[in-house]
Image: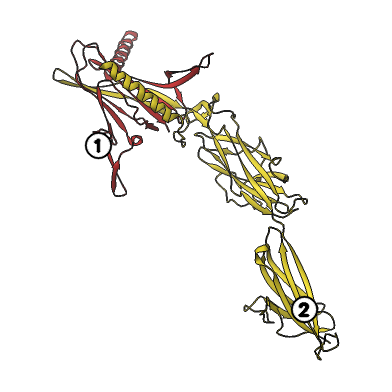
Chain colours: A yellow, B red
Amino acid sequence: MRSMGFLGAASALVLAFGVGANKAHAVGAPAGTVINSTAEVTYTIGSVNTTASSNLVSVTVVEILDVTVAAQTANIAVSPGATTQVARYRVENTGNGPETFRLVLNNAITTDNFDPIAATPAIYLDSGGGAATNGIFDGSDIPYVAGSNDPALPRDTFAIVFVVNDIPATALDSQVGITRLIAESRTGTGVAGTTFAGQGNGLNGAVDAVVGTSGADGEADSNYNVSGVSMSATKTQSVVDNWGGARPVPGARINYSIAVNVTGSGTANNAVFTDNIPANTTYVPGTLALNSVALTDAVDAADDGDFAAAAGPNPARVRVALGPLNTASGTKTITFTVTIN
Amino acid sequence: MFKGSGIPGAAIVACVLSSQAFAQSPGCIVLKTIAEVEQVTVNARGEKSTKLVPAGKVVPGVEVVYTVTANNICKEPAEKVTINNGVPEHMTYVAASAVGPGTDIVFSLDGKTFGTADQLTVQENGATRKARADEYKSIRWVFKDSLAAGAQGFARYRAVLN
């Protein structure tokens, strides 16, 4: 009966171990915490009830070295030749003690189309590098110097890190360039379980430091996506004279039609079409139209087009605000009419 | 002077020693707790073996095996033997890990009310659900039979360091 009990006990232990070994854990007990345990027994001999305690058994929590790096700007739209393109990362100490991390930039990734060009300096710590962060690359940020101002992070805290790159002018539309930020525990990195005896920071002094599941290093990528956009305008004209013909004589009208098209994967923001009224011609009021919809000549909220008479060195012109344009916008056709003086 | 100061000093030392001994085992049952962790070793033939080694330092995520032994050092049997053990701070009880030959094992969420796994419930969002093992705060082993003179009772559980 007693040995049966033990058999049952043994199998329960094995099962428990299998579950526990794969368990992901969030950081709980700080490094250096001393955890005490005492058991208590009550029993009766004769009619005397007695309570007694066991010895106190203590275990000390070692420092676990873990870090995660997350790209907060995983995809950044850029143009060829663009400078100071900022990628933002969050470096978090997911271990259970204070730790300092070395930051490394790697732009030589082989799985992308081009290598971003690291600015000098290329890595910045968000102003303060720790608690005093605003997440914005704004000139108050501190250039990172390896070994000099490596971010020192208490457990469960993070630093915001900026990586600044330029985009090669040779990058083509739809190409991708990857920039990678790596953070490494200064105590050491390695396979999970690697121990650095006495090198951890505990609540009450040094404890062992053990590499956690992250390997005590982390990395994340941001993609620079080249989204080139180019606009083309095709202008056609037709002449109508006062006698039903097409002779360009004084008094004849010229109908202009300009088709604007966009190619490429990007979007042209605030695209504005402007065309000067040709010399020796006069704009016919009220003829400006976009995709056959008439636009008023005044600058007003009614529509996005207007006509301006010649002023000083500026010739008369028509203008149409086309807004954001991409290949999904379709062809924008602007029409207007002038008379030959 | 010399003699006078020496005697009270000795008396204090003796007193401390006896009170310590009294706190741990004031009678027939000597209770002992040990904390251990599993160590897996692989021999030259690649065979794995697991043994328990004392847990002085522990890593978060590791399971600590707590073993409590109760030795009856008297000549009479002890009745109604019950071992209580709170799950230590910063640790979580590992489901189904409490064992103890010849005992009924009950748990508690508050250290006061004990029950079997099926009896413990938690109120959550206006509904009642069964308590999860990771919510147990205390474990109790109730020995079904008396602990004979010279016999040893055994209780064990595992807790994972948060």
Q: Secondary structure at mark 1?
A: loop
Q: Position of residue A160 (x, y in %)?
A: 59, 45
Residue at the spot x=71%, y=80% of the render? A288
Q: Which subunit holds the residue at mark 2? A: A
In the displayed structure, A333 sits above or below B108; it is below
Residue at the spot x=76%, y=82% of the render? A337
Q: Residue furthest front?
A: A245
Q: Is residue A326 visible?
A: no
In this figure, which residue is indicated by the disc labeled 1? B119
Q: Which subunit holds the residue at mark 1? A: B
Residue type for callout 1: Gln
In this figure, which residue is indicated by the disc labeled 2? A256
Count of residue discs? 2
For the C terminus of chain B, the image quarter is top left
- Distance from label 2 to label 1 (Cα)? 87 Å
Kindly indicate the quadrant of the structure image that contains residue B6: top left
Q: Position of residue A116 (x, y in %)?
A: 72, 46
For the N terminus of chain B, the image quarter is top left
In the displayed structure, A108 sits above or below A275; it is above
Q: Secondary structure at mark 2?
A: strand
Q: Is residue A65 left or right of B4 when viewed as pictured? A: right
Label 1 Cα neighbours within 10 Å, binned few <14 / some 14-19 / many ≥20: few
The disc label shown at residue A217, or none: none
